[in-house]
Amino acid sequence: MAPPRILLCGDVLGRLNHLYKRVQSVNKSAGPFDALFCVGQFFPGSPELLEEFMDYVEGRTQIPLPTYFIGDYGVGAPKVLSVASKNSSNLGFKMDGLKICENLFWLRGSGKFTLYGLSVAYLSGRRSSDSQQFGTYSQDDVDALRALADEPGIVDLFLTNEWPTGVTNRATSDIPAGISDSAGSDSTISELVAEIKPRYHIAGAKGVFYAREPYSNIDAVHVTRFFGLASVGNKDKQKFIHAISPTPGSTMTAVEISMKPSNTTSSPYTFSEQTVHPKETTKRPSDGVSDSQYWRYDVSQKRQKAGARDGDKLCFKFIYSGSCPRGENCHFQHDIDAREQYLRGVCIDFLIKGKCERGPDCNFKHDLQSKVESYSHRRHGSENANRSKECWFCLSSPSVESHLIISIGESYYCALAKGPLVQDHVLLIPIEHSPSTLSLPQECESELVRFKNSLKLYFKNRGKEAIIFEWVSKRGTHANLQAAPVPSSRVAAVQDIFNMAADKLGFKFVAMKFDNNSDGRKWLRAQFDRNYSFFYVELPDGTILSHLIEENERFPVQFGREVLAGLLNAPERADWRTCKLSKEEETKMVEEFQKKFEELDPTR
């Protein structure tokens, strides 16, 4: 298959007539091209161009090829983007672009997605001290992008509006006149690009064209090429559109990906390490990467006054993903309660720094979801004593959402999943506070089997099969076994898609097939080790896939859900927080489920 053909463009400034006239000319002479990526300000710089711009947005003039933009600021931006944000087709966890109109997509916030085999990462908006709904990025956006960069695989394209500070360091070719780091440059982007290590980095905002020589990356074999693009219709006639045709990194051989052109320089960002984070210039001899990549934040001012050490600061990687590559060697705190609060929908900025720059525009909660002791007084003994009061799933907890409960037995209860992946997505939850269904006494198994068999029959009567999975944290959260219905026509592909997802993360499942559920559960108990986290999925044909998670292994907490969201062609539903319903909707769904499930309910 031929590599995709991509056009890159600088600040459009609303000049869509000029842009697409040039695009059609290039397409005719050197195309066809598959997509256009625009960096820098996309919206008009003055009201005079708004009518021309809206002709495209409102469909009176057609956009000739798929166009993706990140410069969500300028005249008319709040109105256009607010309408797009509320469009039902754009709701959910969408990293591949919110549709503005036919062939026009807004890459909002930060994210990573695949287009024509290319891995594309982006940071939308510009850095600003003001809290704005559109046009600026937040610390959440930066931190989420850093966590995404930690995932396996090479990023092919990285899109930012502003240039990275220091990109001209060590450059040997002529540098365009008028380039100043103080205008249109951002040190945060320097940090991000040094961590993400994309094969291509594209930026706008400076109004000049600059193609830097390829440079080597630290701890990576491939080089990065930087392109700064001028604005559309600029008076100096500098290049504002550039064509590339990169082979996706995922399909290249090790030899191909490691090839370095003769003009390759060293990384420009090693010069700026001391200036980007002056407070973090001291590195421990054992560190392979800068501590700034672990996003340490002071928990509170009180601790600073008390002389905070690194151990009093939180590791963002652990909070975001549930694991940290450094494991026990990490210099920052792997705080379980902070991780649980994040899973409950609490804003990361609020949780770690005590405030959020987005304010009311933030999609996450700005209050703790249970009465948690202060960080300075939390100890293991008091944590265990208060766990049931804090836990989302303990029936005795004030935090439990009792309106989601469907049925209660002696050892287990059944509840509708919060932010369900699909309709009738339910959880089987131990009544006792236990980190795993596999660590409960053997006598609890018979009731669990009855619940599972009832759910399987309930789903089968509706042309579906139950996919049952559990993620077991060795750090002691309350167990919940998830049962998600999948159309019978898709069941044959379930094992393959789980194996493909495992390959992407660099591990292989242990697979065993059993004639009855009891034997399968006995085998799982034998595989389970309380000293490790554990994931397993039970398939309709009796096959069980399991994986023991190593201490330093990166493993997504929502892995099972993410895989099934992909199977169902609903990637926007991979994160439960984007699927939350109102309490009234949840109550109605529970009542409807109970009526249909009543005859099969093993507790009746």
Image (cartoon, rainbow, N blue to C red):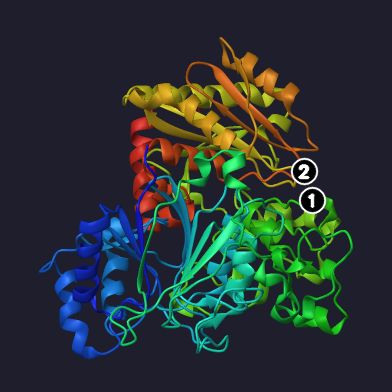
Residue 348 visible from this viewpoint: yes
- Give the residue drawn at x 54%, y 80%: 175
Closer to the camera in the image, 108 or 548: 108
Closer to the camera in the image, 66 or 79: 66
Q: Is residue 409 above or below residue 270?
A: above
- Give the residue drawn at x 81%, y 38%: 531
**How far across and down, in percent of the image, does residue 22 sit?**
23, 69
Label 1 neighbourhood size at 10 Å, few (<14), some (14-19), many (20+)?
A: some
The image quadrant that residue 15 belongs to is bottom left
* Residue 340: image tag: none
**How far across and down, in percent of the image, does residue 122 sit?**
47, 64
Q: Is residue 200 above or below residue 258?
A: below
Q: Name the secondary structure under disc 1.
A: helix
- Spatial CA distance of label 2 from label 1 is 6 Å
Mark 2 or mark 1: which comes first in sequence?
Answer: 1
Q: Is residue 296 above or below residue 253?
A: below
Residue wearing tag 1: 327
Residue wearing tag 2: 551
**How far across and down, in percent of the image, does residue 475 sit?**
75, 47
In-image side of 22 versus 405 (left or right): left
Closer to the camera in the image, 445 or 235: 235
Marks 2 and 1 close (CB-CB < 8 Å): yes
Task: Work out which residue is located at the far left of the displayed protein and give it.
Answer: 60
Q: Name the secondary structure under disc 2.
A: loop
In-image side of 186 versus 86 (left or right): right
Q: Amino acid at mark 2?
A: Glu
